[in-house]
Each structure stands twice: as structure tokens, then as C-alpha cells.
Amino acid sequence: MTATPDRLNDPPTPPPLGGLRRLVDGAGILGGLAVALMALHVVLDVAARNLAGLPLSGTTEFVAGWYMVAVVFCALGSVHARGDHIRVDLIDMIAGPRLDGLLTLFTSLVFLAVAAAMTAWGIDDALDATLRGERVEFATWALPVWPGRWLVPAGFALTGLVALLDLGRGFGRLIQRRPVPGDGA
């Protein structure tokens, strides 16, 4: 199986797509940073527990409410833009540009619909959590978890933008001119 090219870097890249490229890359970097911070936090917790008998309070809650949410939803748009999600390329191998365009249109519409619905749901959920000041209480402190809730709609909105770009690409493949035999193309 060949690697899918990064769809945001297909030449030429007009200025708006360059901004989307930076946004997608930045979100992916934040997801990677969350993985590194989560690993460091867990290692420190295990070391403190085993060496000093004093585990770090709230590690599990921090991982669940902040790190894991960032890992998944910050990287969502980047994964979609690069085509690194789970794919079945069997049809792509035998499809011509028009069928490929139809399939791209269909999958882009599905991605766009799901992304729009999840963005709307995520905004509603995050707003509710923000207004309630959602947090996890400990004996001596409280961990606010409502800010992490905003990563869900942000990640789905970014994925929706990439799906919208794919939708345009699908239309382009559908109307692509077929080469005329003997045209040298």
C-alpha cells in the first residue's frame, strides 16, 4: 500500500490553504506535546509512588480530562488531512478519476456531516461544562476540566474544514477532462 499524499500540500497551495496547513500542523503538534506531557506526568507519578510512597494527586483525572482529550482531538484534523486514518484502498486501485471523484465526494460529505454534528454537540457540551465550572474535587484542590471540553468541537471543526477541502477536490475529479487518445497525455 502506498502512502497517501498530504492533501493540504497538493500543489499549488493558495494562501487560505497555507493558513489551514499551519492550523492543522499546530493542532497536531499540540497533540504530540500532550502525549509527551502525559508520559512525563505518569512517569513522575509512578516514580513518586514507588520511591517515596507519595503518588501525585489527580494524575488519573488529569490524564482523562486533559491529556487524552488533547491527544485525540488536537490530532484529528491532522490525521484526516494526511489520510492517515483507517482506509480501504481496494476500490481506489481500480477506480478511474470519475469514480474516485464520486467516492471522494461521498466520503467527504459523510465526514463533513459527522464533523458538523459533533462540532455542534461538542460546543453545547463544552458550553454547559464551562457555565457549570466543571471540575474534579480533591481533598486540598480542584482540577478544572471544562477547558479540555473545548478541544472536542475544535478538533471536529478542523476536521470539517479538511473535509470541505476534500469535497472541492472530489468535484474537481468529477469534472476532470479525460485525455483524448493520441493527445500525448
Image (tube, helix red, strand yellow):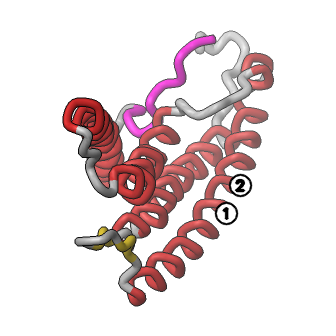
- Residue under label 2: 110
Residue drawn 59% across the image and 61% down it = 115
Residue 124 locus on image (x, y percent): 53, 81
Amino acid type, mark 2:
Val
Q: Is residue 91 left or right of residue 61?
A: right
Seen as rendered, the residue at the extreme bottom is 131
Residue drawn 41% across the image and 51% down it = 60
Q: Main secondary structure of the magenta part?
A: loop
Amino acid type, mark 1:
Ala
Residue drawn 67% across the image and 63% down it = 113
Residue 173 locus on image (x, y percent): 64, 38
Q: Are marks 1 and 2 in contact (CB under 8 Å)?
A: yes
Q: Is residue 101 left or right of residue 65?
A: right
- Residue under label 1: 113
- In whole angstroms, how far apart are the C-alphas of marks 1 and 2? 5 Å
Q: Secondary structure at mark 1?
A: helix
Residue 127 locus on image (x, y percent): 44, 83
Relative to residue 16, is residue 99 depicted above or below? above
Image: magenta residue range: 1-10
Q: Secondary structure at mark 2?
A: helix
Seen as rendered, the residue at the extreme left is 52
Residue 50 locus on image (x, y percent): 28, 31
Tell me, yes or no, if residue 183 can be seen here. Answer: yes
Residue drawn 53% across the image and 58% down it = 160
Q: Is residue 120 left or right of residue 35?
A: right
Q: Is residue 111 left or right of residue 80?
A: right
Q: How would you rate the neighbour count of disc 2 (Cα within 10 Å): few for under 14, some for 14-19, many for 20 or more?
A: some
